[in-house]
Image (cartoon, rainbow, N blue to C red):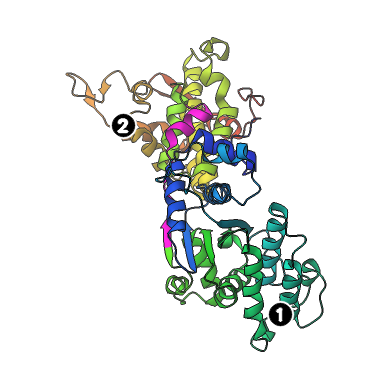
Amino acid sequence: MKNYGMIPTEDNLIQALLEDILNRNKDIVFFYDLLMAQEGSSTIAIDGRWGSGKTFFVRQSMLVINAKNPSSTFDEEKRARITSRLFFKKKSEDDTNCDLAVYYDAWENDNDTDPVLSIIYEITKQLSIEYDFKEKDIYKTAAHIVEVISGKNVSGLLESLKGENPLEKFKEQKILSEKIKQFFSEILIERGERLVVFVDELDRCKPTYAVRLLEQIKHYLSDDRVIFVFSVNIDELQHTIKHYYGDDFDACRYLDRFFDFRIALPPADLTKYYEKLGMNTGYVSEKVTMRIIKMYKMELRGISRFYRQVKTAVYIPTHDNDNKKFDFAFSDGAAKLFMLMYIVPLAIGLNIVDISLYDDFVNGKDDSPLIELFAGEDVGEWDLRNCLKNDESFDDEESKTKVTKEQIVKRVYKAIFVNEYTGRKHSEIVGQYEFDDSAKKYIISTSSMMSEYADYNI
């Protein structure tokens, strides 16, 4: 099975810049210009829902900053690949910066003893790899900071991360702030003027670690030459803060202490993304998939996961022009094709978005998702007309009863999920479709990719 999601490896990050699949290159340029315009220390929060592409955005921004720094070790070919599809306002040779950028995954590090030590270690590790600091005093300075914080003689940063929480000693060690400034000076000397630290996944951290990281950055890592960029879901982060301080705590005002700016991650342009996934074939199932994505405001990660499962579950019958081999020409077969094109994708989407919505839907308690699906003008009206009786119409026609889409959808939903077929009543005819007691099981098993229609090799 093909994975439609993109892992943020350096190659994928650069390729996404070259292809500009989400039409966000222009936003990366705007954000770069915003960072370059900052004077003194600054803290910026980029707000976006989980799965919206925040990690890709900030890691691409980090690449751009380092590519535009003439002192970085990026070769010319790599610089060109990163920046060739970015259109900056300045076109002169002076269109460069002297900033360094590093990336810190807070969630990956929230088991560390102390956020300050963890960040210092990550900065040292990334810049010692990216730049040749081996002969400088940066390690001695970093080790000295650790000694001041922990109050014991520590020879290396890795060992320092294993100690007990040293925060109580901070106030007693006035030399700490001086050593941290020295640490930043030695990082930036000859290589850059400022450091941009991208902090990602803070909203996924344990509440204790998230709060400590924010407060320690505020108190101990504030420096005129350092910009912190937090990639977060503000709403989720506020829940994290309240979990730590209590439900009555004003988490929004609390976060205002730490963020100078709050920026909403620009929405992705899904047109090219759909083309990249292959959702531009014109098949009904593709239109249904896009409709469900829109209904539930799925983000990029959710879209790729959803489309992967739908395509695997129903690709063969919904994309094969020769449907005779699936017996779709008969009334019960036509009903199966109807369910494959509309109800199975909806069931998959509900299962991904909210399992409680899925449970209510398949257990006959809530027909609203199906009503909303067919409310879209571009989805399913022709197939829904096949559910009409001979004397019914959606339009004003002489000698016919005018009915609404919603009435017909409710009729279909009831036939599949509500009716109990016992005794002589083993099925129900809805227009040209015949639904029976196996319809519900058919939908559940097919949406779980456990049917003859699934193709695991696409």
Query: Is residue 338 something one can see in this rendering?
Result: yes
Q: Residue 405 got which mark?
A: 2
Residue 274 at what x, y percent from top left? 47, 31
Q: Give the range drawn in magenta.
A: 262-279
Q: How crowded is mark 1: few (under 14 residues within 10 Å), some or many (20 or more)?
A: many
Q: Disc 2 residue type?
A: Lys
* Quadrant assignment, res 189: bottom right
What residue lies at 68% left-to-right and 67% top-to-bottom?
Answer: 120
Is 183 on the left or on the right of 336, as rendered?
Answer: right
Q: Which mark, by number, is residue 149?
A: 1
Secondary element at image label 2: helix
Q: Is residue 5 visible?
A: no
Residue found at x 64% / y 22% = 452
For marks 2 and 1, the one nearer the N-term is 1
Kind of element beneath mark 1: helix
Q: In this view, does 120 lie above or below 330?
A: below
The local crowd at label 2, few if under 14, some if 14 to 19, many if 20 or more residues have their Cα within 10 Å, is some
Separation of residues labelled 2 and 1 (CA atoms): 68 Å
Position of residue 303 measured from the top left corner of the image (x, y, whole percent): 51, 39
Tell which of 417 and 50 is nearer to you.
50
Give the side of residue 110 with respect to residue 86, left or right.
Answer: right
Query: Magenta span has 363?
Result: no
Q: Residue 430: percent from the left, percent from the top?
A: 40, 24
Q: Can residue 271 be found in the magenta stretch? A: yes
Residue at the image position 42 percent from the left and 49 percent from the top: 30
